[in-house]
Amino acid sequence: MPEGREAVQGKGYPPPAAVIRPYCVSMRVHVVSDVHGRAAALRTAADGADALLCLGDLLLFVDYADHGQGIFAELFGADAASRFVALRTARQFDEARAMSRALWQRLDGEPAQRIEQAARRQYAALFAALPVPAYLTYGNVDLPYLWGDHLRAGHTVLDGARAELGGWSFGFVGGGLRTIYRTPNEIGDEEFAAKVAAVGQVDVLCSHIPPAVPQLLYDTVARRMERGSTALLAAIRQHQPRYVLYGHVHQPLARRVRIGRTECLNVGHFRATGRPFVLEL
């Protein structure tokens, strides 16, 4: 049977039957992903919740909707960003990289230093706005080595690790898989699979990218398939967590599917909506 064939789109589905856990308490968890620089909305993302989960992609490098926003536009201007977006949308990646190299040659300083300076400014605003308690993992466009300088008390970063909240077990797997887009925090399949294995069996499995189910990976606006994880899909089949939460695909063909007793849920594009996904446990 091809991967994903057993997954049934379930917009109106009831949640899977809960395992009786007398030590667990009822919880309201808010979840965000693909924040992409929207610091102001992040300030209220945990209002009414017991905890906030953030599934990565805090930085905004290029805004495909508003070409005047993001690190690229900050450095080179909105017109250059528009040309860059057009090339990437047309999948002319060699041309886009050549354009980028030419632009960098006109600037003073090393490209990595200029990107890091701009990223630090975004992270400073984002982590100042991020409520507590918050449990975070990395996205594919994040720069993990910069996070430590901006974390506050009550911010917990987890990647290939677990946390217990109200008696419920949560596992976190960050980053993305390698693609032709060459975003900053892409890793190999084996490294990603090792993090999934380290998490093991949990009630709620959280990842930046979706499991490798086609209808979860197709972006209906960008008109392309994103990469999903076969390791996540295997873990779902083996362990049957109650929920799998993820982001990454901004406008998915299907926002939720059921695999066995597991409900897989895209928590939404926070930059576009400014609203968290609400999970009641």
Image: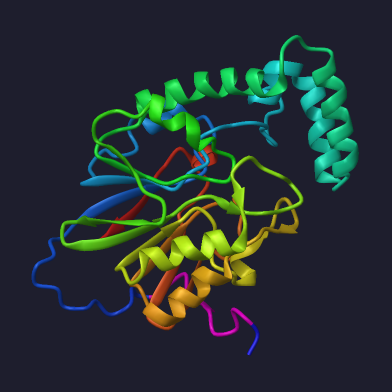
Residue 218: x percent and y percent?
Answer: 67, 62
In the image, 247 versus 10, the foreground residue is 247
> Based on the displayed image, in which of its 4 quarters is residue 70 positioned?
top right
Asked if 109 appears above or below 91 in the picture, the reply is: above
> Based on the displayed image, in which of its 4 quarters is residue 102 positioned?
top right
In the image, 137 versus 280, the foreground residue is 137
Q: Which residues are magenta?
A: 3-13
Horizontal placement of 256 versus 28: left or right? right
Which residue appears at 57% of the width and 17% of the height? 117
Which residue appears at 45% of the width and 60% of the height? 195
Which residue appears at 71% of the width and 21% of the height? 111
Asked if 202 appears above or below 268 in the picture, the reply is: below
Asked if 276 appears above or below 79 in the picture, the reply is: below
Asked if 277 appears above or below 122 in the picture, the reply is: below
Does the segment drawn in magenta span residue 4? yes
Residue 238: x percent and y percent?
Answer: 42, 81
> Where the C terminus falls, by quadrant?
bottom left
Horizontal placement of 54 versus 231: left or right? left
> Where the N terminus falls, by quadrant?
bottom right
Which residue appears at 29% of the width and 39% of the height? 46
Residue 52: x percent and y percent?
Answer: 31, 44
Residue found at the very far bottom of the displayed protein: 1
